[in-house]
Image: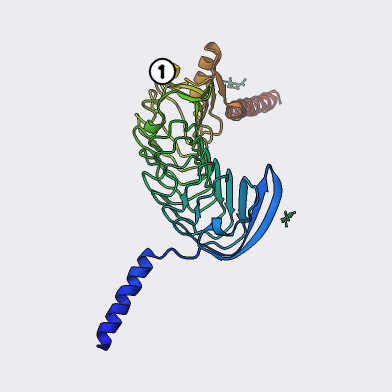
Amino acid sequence: MLLKTFLLCVLLYTASARTRSGVTFKNVVVRGYSMFTSKFNVTINSANTLKDKLPKQVFDKLEIVDSEIPVLYENSISDIDDLDELILNNDGITEIQPGTFKNVPQLRKLVITHNQGLEEIKSGVFNRLNIATMDLSKNSINTIASSAFDDMPELLNVNLADNQLKIWDKNWFADTPLLTRVSFQNNHISEIPARAFRNFRGEKQFGSVPLTINIVLSNNEIKTIHEDAFKGLDKINNLWLDGNEIDSWDENLLSKVAVKDLRIDNNRLQCLSGDLKNIFVAATTHIDGNPWDCGCLKNIDLWASQHGKDVIMYYSKMNCDAERIDRKLKDLNHLLKELRKNDTEEAGDQE
Ligand SMILES: *[C@@H]1O[C@H](CO)[C@@H](O)[C@H](O)[C@H]1NC(C)=O
Ligand SMILES: *[C@@H]1O[C@H](CO)[C@@H](O)[C@H](O)[C@H]1NC(C)=O
């Protein structure tokens, strides 16, 4: 009998644990704003859903910062009609459950940063929301589900800088027709796979404003770029790959892409082989800070000036010039020594 009761208790407990939506907000201060003006500050002692404890006041922005909300449970931020902007910074967030955000039709900007324990973005958290700008920078995110950002019709701008990502997933961002800026700098991504940006294809237009793609992958650990990495794209505004470990560059990598600003500075490039016409497709290409072979750099410089391409290599050129001058000085020194030697020999002969 006792055992039976015990088992029943365990059963009930696990069942309730599975469906339990815990208390998300415990002793947190929520600040409300309207048109950039502070409207209210409320302290929530205990609530599962934010909506229940908000004052009946007009607001468009909510901010919870420097608080403790370790788990954002399902439905915790739901049914808030006029919320346009939500800021959750430095709140010790470790988990965001699928279904946290529901029925927030006006939410355009979501900022969740400085949460050191936040490592994973699951599927079902952001899908189908109307967010345009999503800032998830400065957390510890190392895992993002392939479908985490699918079906986001208004998504324009995603910031995942300063996280712990090691992998670029080519399946991210399916059905995000407006997505034009992805900032992934300061992560540990080591490879750009084939068709990495296949979900970025197509004309992008915001109202009557045409949009072009910006891809920021600066300061990662990229060593390998698949030859078809950019396949399918025909226009990129900024493509920033500076501060990586790239030591070779496939001449056809960008041959069909119109790029405005290409940054491959501060990598490990020594020379570029192949047709420079295919390589330097960008209006401006930054190549400084690579361990260039000086002869190779000179060719690039010559080619660029002949073809009116803006290739920025100011410091590398200076280094190579310095090297050349250094070599000349050494030659000169050698010559001087020899002359002096001959002089003394001659002087010796005369004596
Ligand atoms: C809310 O708190 C902030 C900072 O403590 C203060 O500047 C602001 O005036 C407060 N807003 C209201 C409406 O009381
Ligand atoms: C120094 O003397 C040697 C032998 O006499 C000669 O071959 C060499 O060209 C001289 N060097 C210079 C710099 O005049």
Q: As displayed, is residue 134 above or below residue 208?
A: below
Residue neighbourhood size for the residue with mark 1, other residues' Cα within 10 Å, grouped as few (<14), some (14–19), many (≥20): few
Nearer to me, 275 or 323: 275
307 vs 31: above or below:
above
**Which residue is at a point 65% across and 24% down the rendered structure image?**
339
Q: Residue 274, located in which quarter of the rendered image?
A: top left
| Image quarter hosting the C terminus | top right
Residue sitting at the far bottom: 2
Q: What element carries label 1?
A: loop
Rendering coords of residue 289 (x, y %): 55, 34
Question: Is ligand 2 closer than 8 angstroms to the Cβ of mark 1?
Answer: no
Ligand 2 - quadrant of the structure image: top right
The image quarter containing residue 226 is: top left
Residue type of the residue flagged with mark 1: Asp
Q: The N terminus appears in which quarter of the rendering?
A: bottom left
Query: Extreme front residue here?
Result: 56
Q: Position of residue 332 (x, y in %)?
A: 63, 25
**Count of numbered marks:** 1
Q: Where is residue 235 in the image (x, y as percent from the top left)?
A: 46, 23
Nearer-the-camera pick, 42 or 231 = 42
Residue under label 1: 275
Seen in the picture, residue 223 relative to 279 is either above or below; the reply is below
Q: Where is residue 221 in the image (x, y as percent from the top left)?
A: 45, 43
The residue positioned farthest toward the top in the image shown: 306
Name which residue lies at 68% across and 42% down: 35
Model colouring? rainbow
